[in-house]
Amino acid sequence: MQQQQPPQGTQHSENMPPVNSHGGHELFDAHEVIATIISMLDQYQLYYQHMQDQELKSILNRQYTFMTNLYNTMIETFQTGQKPTFSTEVYNMTTDNNVIYGLTPVPQKKPNQSVSEITDAGLSGYMLGQTKGLASLMTMTALEMTNPVLRRVVSDSIPNVIEMSYEIFIYQNKHSYYQVPQLAPADMTTMLQSYTAAPPAPLN
């Protein structure tokens, strides 16, 4: 059977060089992700200068190195449309995932009046905001990708940025910067028991 030809003015990706295998919307979204990663790396450099806690500095350094490698992988894929020289890696926290639940009194918060008032609590909060925002942006972008390699690089990177966010949360939680309230036990039980399993039957 003769292969059907694409409509006039269109072409299949299999007949295009990989470097051109990008949709217009994809290019704009990829630009936004790459620009956001650059912004994150630039701001991490600024944060580092004001940090006091060595543990937080260590977290920032690990995340900075990892994101620099991801940036290089992403721009290579973006510019070539092909499998990059170095594949995406897996980011692993070096701390445990012990969460402290409950609230304890802490000083009231207000905007800083000068740079000298910046603290590790604020800096870790800025980091958390950036990783959360990047994870959301990359998720939306992965859904818009047409180039299969770039889509895979972006989608594979989302769990890593989520892990970074969780690592920062654990640090903040340990220092009471990010406290986690809980519902009353009876309310929690009601919420947890409000669903039941569905039978795995196909639709007829």
Image (spheres, grey):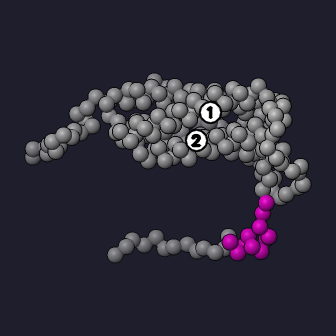
- Looking at the rendering, the stretch of residues picked out in magenta corresponds to 181-191
Out of 168 and 204, give the one closest to the viewer. 168
The type of residue carrying mark 1 is Met
The residue drawn where x is 23% and y is 39% is 12
The residue drawn where x is 80% and y is 70% is 184
Q: Residue furthest front?
A: 113
Out of 103 and 1, give the one closest to the viewer. 103
Above/below status of 7 relative to 40:
below
Above/below status of 146 relative to 70:
below
Look at the numbered discs 1 and 2 and tell me whether their residues touch, using CB distance below 8 Å.
Answer: yes
Question: Could you classify mark 1 by the number of other residues whose Cα lies within 10 Å: few (under 14), some (14-19), or many (20 or more)?
Answer: many
Q: Quadrant of the C terminus?
A: bottom left
The residue drawn where x is 64% and y is 27% is 42
Asked where in the image residue 77 lies, by quadrant, the reply is top left
Out of 79 and 91, give the one closest to the viewer. 79
The residue drawn where x is 38% and y is 26% is 80
Task: Tell me the residue that label 2 is attached to.
Answer: 134
The disc, 1 or 2, on the residue closer to the chain's N-terminal end is 1
Q: Is residue 187 on the magenta stretch?
A: yes
Above/below status of 160 relative to 51:
below
The type of residue carrying mark 2 is Leu
What secondary structure is found at the residue carrying circle 1?
A: helix
Q: Residue furthest left?
A: 1
What secondary structure is found at the residue carrying circle 2?
A: helix
Q: Is residue 15 on the magenta stretch?
A: no
**Can I make out residue 61 in this image?**
no
**Can I make out residue 199 in this image?**
yes
Q: Please, what is the dominant secondary structure of the magenta stretch?
A: helix
Task: Tell me the residue that label 1 is attached to.
Answer: 40
Q: Position of residue 22 (x, y in %)?
A: 35, 36
Q: Position of residue 82 (x, y in %)?
A: 38, 29
